[in-house]
Amino acid sequence: MSPKRLKRKVVPDLQRYFVPAENWEDNRVMITNDDAHHISRVMRSKPGDVIICNHPDGKAVTCQITDITKNHVQAVIKERLGESAELPVNVTIAQGLPKSDKFELVLQKGTELGATAFVPVQADRSVVAWDDKKTEKKMNRFSRIVKEASEQCHRNKIPFIQPVRAIKTLVDESSEYDLKLFAFEEEAKTEEYQSFGMLVSEINPGDRVLIVIGPEGGFSEQEAALLKQNEFVPIRLGPRILRTETAALYALASISYHFEELGCRSCRQ
């Protein structure tokens, strides 16, 4: 018996740009700055060419370019696309600050896997520490990374990157989430552990989920105790101890598979 084939609407394979809300007016869109340069100098587009523009609210439309200058591109809206490539669950990844460029990898691949937001966390065992000057520079680079990743993988929205938080601050601001988890390597070592798969099966579309990942050295005893005391559930991400930059991607891929590939009834409602 051949496997059942699913039908989906085919979205045009066009270059995609995220345009700020203030640059939309009636049926026209104004594209500026680096995106305008990309259209005119990199893609060498001309009036009459068609692109996809995304509004911050998630709306995606095809647009026909009407005018191109060095710093501005004018386009007229042709068709609204009913597509959505967003994960049915709002997942925020709170990542303990890792060494080198590992956080950039989490941002890029986490965006591709559907994360709604990211929170860099200054944990007890984080080797690196960001000062104010370094943070501003890094945030600008991080914003470019998630924007480019969102365009590449055809996201409808760009994930939000929150300011750096201490664990205590993260806990104090966590009341908005429906489910709060933290990847705890000690869970992977026990015979009786909290199954991440079982927890995922209990999540409903639209739920807000916060997943906290420790840095290379994991969570300190004090941090683990604080999280448990504030309704964060310790979870095991498989039987192997994952690197910090792998853990968030494992969690996101598992959620994506459950909601977007298994085809559970609640996901289609």
Image: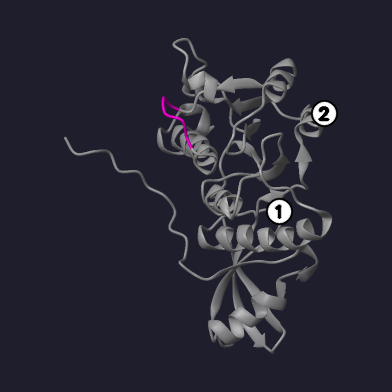
Q: Quadrant of residue 202?
A: top right
Q: Is residue 51 above or below residue 132?
A: below
Q: Position of residue 50 (x, y in %)?
A: 54, 76
> Disc 2 vs disc 1: Cβ atoms closer than 8 Å?
no
Residue stretch rendered in magenta on the structure? 238-242
- Label 2 crowd bin: few (<14), some (14–19), many (20+), radius 10 Å: few
Labelled disc at residue 33: none
Is the magenta region chiefly helix, strand or loop? loop
The residue carrying mark 1 is: 57
SS at circle 1: loop
Q: Quadrant of residue 54?
A: bottom right
At 48% from the left edge and 37% from the top edge, which residue is drawn? 250
Q: Residue 94: x and y, percent?
A: 67, 38
Q: Is residue 199 visible?
A: no
Tell me how many marks there are. Answer: 2
Q: At 51% from the left edge and 32% from the top edge, which residue is drawn?
A: 267
Q: Badge 1: how crowded within 10 Å, few (<14), some, or many (20+)? A: few
Q: Which residue is mark 2?
A: 172
Mark toward the start of the polypeptide (2 vs 1): 1
